[in-house]
Amino acid sequence: MSSEQIAVLALAAVLVFWMVGAYNRLVALRNAIGAAWAGVSQTLQQRGDVVAPLLLALQQPLAAEHGALDALRTSHGQAHAAAAQMTAQPLALASVSTWRAAEASLTSAASRVLALLDQHAELRSTAPVATGVATWHLAGSRLAYGCQVYDAAVAAYNEAATQMPTRWLLRLYGFAPAARLKG
């Protein structure tokens, strides 16, 4: 073998090792996004477990406000479906935008019900309602933290995907940019 052939073989080997390394890095970063979503999903499940008992406890005392309770029930169902879609495809841009919209709707409906509870202080102090509201607020703070972790994982993935040599391989590997949950 001539020195030129050895140099070409060495260059090809370096190129192959670089491609494998870039692929492994993107896969690891993509898996980190999936793991971050799993934490968010667990918090969403805990928060979602509160909605049905809370609605049941409020159904009779707030019968005149059935519109607000129905809006919470409906938006909770939509948010649950959007979270399931995100669990199946945590990097899909459509899944993220659907989850954002469903979460905004749920937040709005929950704010309306919580405002009604502020007007009925005696109702808010009952055991099932107090527990439900406390759990809702605790899950909300955990959800904010989980979204930050997810967004940090997305930022790391997107940064690695846009670095110059790796960017050339995205189409070859079938990777696409990911969207943040907040913002």
Image: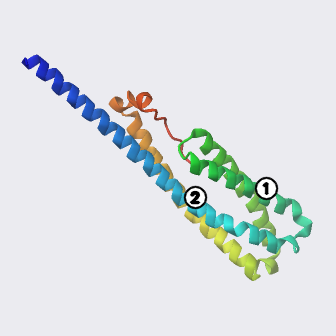
Within-10-Å neighbours for mark 2: few <14, some 14–19, many 20+: some
Give 136 or 74, whichever is nearer the viewer.
Answer: 74
Q: Which of marks 1 and 2 is nearer the N terminus?
A: 2
- Against 100, residue 167 (above or below) is above
Q: Do the residues labelled 1 and 2 touch (CB within 8 Å)?
A: no
- Against 86, residue 5 (above or below) is above
- Against 32, residue 25 (above or below) is above
Q: Quadrant of the N terminus?
A: top left
Q: Residue 55: name its quadrant.
A: bottom right
Going 44% across and 49% down the picture, which residue do you hit?
Answer: 31
Q: Which colour scheme is used?
A: rainbow
Residue 150 percent location from the top left of the image: 50, 52
Residue labelled with disc 2: 41
- Left or right, 85 with respect to 4, comes to right
Going 81% across and 68% down the picture, which residue do you hit?
Answer: 116
Residue 26 percent location from the top left of the image: 39, 41
- Left or right, 46 with respect to 120, comes to left
Residue labelled with disc 1: 74
Residue 128 percent location from the top left of the image: 74, 78
- Left or right, 183 with respect to 168, comes to right
Number of numbered labels in the structure image: 2
- Please, what is the three-letter code of the amino acid marked with disc 2? Ser
| Secondary element at tag 1 | helix
Going 75% across and 55% down the picture, which residue do you hit?
Answer: 75
Spatial CA distance of label 1 from label 2 is 19 Å
- Please, what is the three-letter code of the amino acid marked with disc 1? Thr
- Left or right, 146 with respect to 136, comes to left
| Secondary element at tag 2 | helix
Going 85% across and 70% down the picture, which residue do you hit?
Answer: 59
